[in-house]
Amino acid sequence: MGWLFAVALGMQERRRATVLLALVPITMGHALSVVTVALVLRLGQATIPWRELRIAAAFLLIGFGLLRLVRPYLHPRWVGMRVDFGDLVLWSFLMASAHGAGLMLAPVLLHLPRAYSSPQSATIAGWEIIGIHTLALLLVMGTVALAVYQTAGLGLLRRAWINLDLLWAGALVAAGGATLLLPT
C-alpha cells in the first residue's frame, strides 16, 4: 500500500515530485523487511533442518494469509500524514512486515541452497533476488502511484476500490502452499 501513501502525500502537497520522493523511503522500508526475513531464514538454515524450516515458513505464510482474511484491517496506525523520511522508512518496514511481504520470498530463498552448488553462490543469488524484487516493487509502485496521481487522484479510489487485502491474503496462502510443495 506504499503507492497509496505516496499518492496521498503528493495530493496533500499538490506536487508530483512529492509522490516520487516518497517512493524512496517506502522502498527502503520494504527492502529492510525483506532483508530481515532473508537473514532470519539464513540463520534458520544454519540451525534447523531444511525440511522443518520449509514447513515452518509454509505455515507462517498460510497463517499470515489466514490472519489477513480474518482481520483484514489489522495495521499499525501510529503514523499520520505529516511524515519525514525516517517515518516513511519505519512505516514501510512495519507495513511490509505486518503484511508478510518478506515471507513471500521464502519459497525462493529456501530453495536456493539446494539449487546451487555452494552456499556462497546461493547467498549471492539470494541478494540478487532481493535486489530484483525491490527494483520490481519500486517500478510497479511508482507506475501505479504516478498513474493514479496524474489521472484521477484519490477520488478514483472511492469509485473503483479493489480489496487488495483480500487479494494479498490469497497470495500469502498460495505462497505457503508453494513452499510446502518445494521438492525435498
Image (cartoon, grey):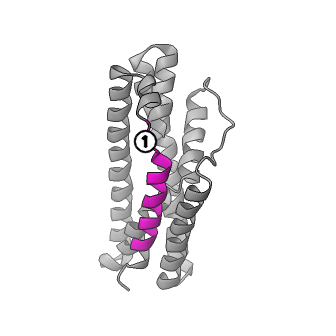
Indicate the amino acid at tag 1: Ile
Using the rendered view, name the quadrant where residue 108 is placed: bottom left
Q: Is residue 62 above or below residue 180?
A: above
Depth check, front residue: 38 or 164:
164
| Residue 134 coordinates in the image, percent (x, y) | 38, 47
Residue 170 on the magenta segment: yes
User: Left of 57 or right of it: where is 182?
Assistant: left
| Residue 41 coordinates in the image, percent (x, y) | 51, 69
Q: Secondary structure at mark 1?
A: loop
Depth check, front residue: 22 or 7:
7
In the image as oriented, which residue stretches furthest toward the right? 78
| Residue 89 coordinates in the image, percent (x, y) | 55, 38
Residue drawn at (45%, 46%), measured in percent from left and top?
Answer: 164
Residue underneath mark 1:
162
Using the rendered view, name the quadrant where residue 81 is placed: top right
Magenta-drawn stretch, dominant element (helix, strand or loop): helix
- Magenta extent: 161-178
